[in-house]
Amino acid sequence: MIGVLAAVAATVGDLLLLATSNAGRPGFEWLGPPYRRWVAALGVAGGVLGGTTHGLTGLVIHVEQSGGAGGLDPVMLLGRHGAYLLPLWAAIAMLSLAGSIAYATALLAGRSSLPRALAPVNPLVLTIAIALGAAGSSLGRAFLVPAAPNLAHVVFFGTVAMRHRRAR
């Protein structure tokens, strides 16, 4: 079952990366020209860093479990491997912030086919909302808070795709 879930997660990630990389192509004009390049470039950079981060996180988990560690305490894991993971997380957060600002700015300036009301439906705001909503339970903290950026991108790209399809 874990393999199936991992494959689904990887597929969703691939599709989101493809959606980002195709944003600048004709027929995918989600944003006006001044912002499209920035959002696409930031999305591609975030996708590369995201894939690297997921790979490194998987390696860290493997190393910990190979060493006989039972349940992995996230604080202990960060204490041991944070020097590798935290800089990647910080870089991804900065790219998400920059991309979300570029997207929201384009919408609020009226330089997009999307309505201004969708400006807050961006990866940064959605990540924060999902994390805050999930933080109230141990299950939410264990699964949804760490997955909040991925879930936020699913909601973001899904919303943009549905709105774009509806506009056609």
Image: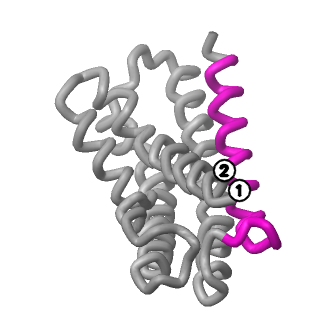
The three-letter code of the residue at mark 2 reads: Leu
Snapshot quadrant of residue 46: bottom right
Badge 2 vs badge 1, beta-carbon distance below 8 Å? yes
Q: Is residue 103 above or below residue 156?
A: below
Please give the range of residues in magenta. Answer: 4-29
Residue at 70% in and 72% down: 29
What's the magenta bit mostly, secondary-structure-wise?
helix
Residue at 66% in and 75% down: 41
Dot 1 falls on a residue whose secondary structure is helix
Farthest residue, direction top:
1
Residue at 71% in and 56% down: 19
Residue toward you, 147 or 161: 161
Residue at 30% in and 27% down: 140
Going by the image, does 41 lie left or right of 98?
Answer: right
Residue toward you, 156 or 30: 30
The location of residue 3, given as percent across then percent down, is 68, 18
Q: Is residue 152 magenta?
A: no
Farthest residue, direction left:
136
Q: How much space separates mark 2 and mark 1, taking CA atoms? A: 5 Å
The location of residue 98, given as percent across then percent down, is 46, 75
Dot 2 falls on a residue whose secondary structure is helix
Snapshot quadrant of residue 108: bottom left
Residue toward you, 88 or 83: 88
Label 2 crowd bin: few (<14), some (14–19), many (20+), radius 10 Å: many
User: Number of labelled discs?
Assistant: 2
- The N terminus lies in quadrant: top right
Which residue is under mark 1?
19
Q: How is the image coloured?
A: one colour
Which residue is under mark 2?
16
The three-letter code of the residue at mark 1 reads: Ala
Going by the image, does 12 lie left or right of 108?
Answer: right
Q: Is residue 42 above or below residue 158?
A: below
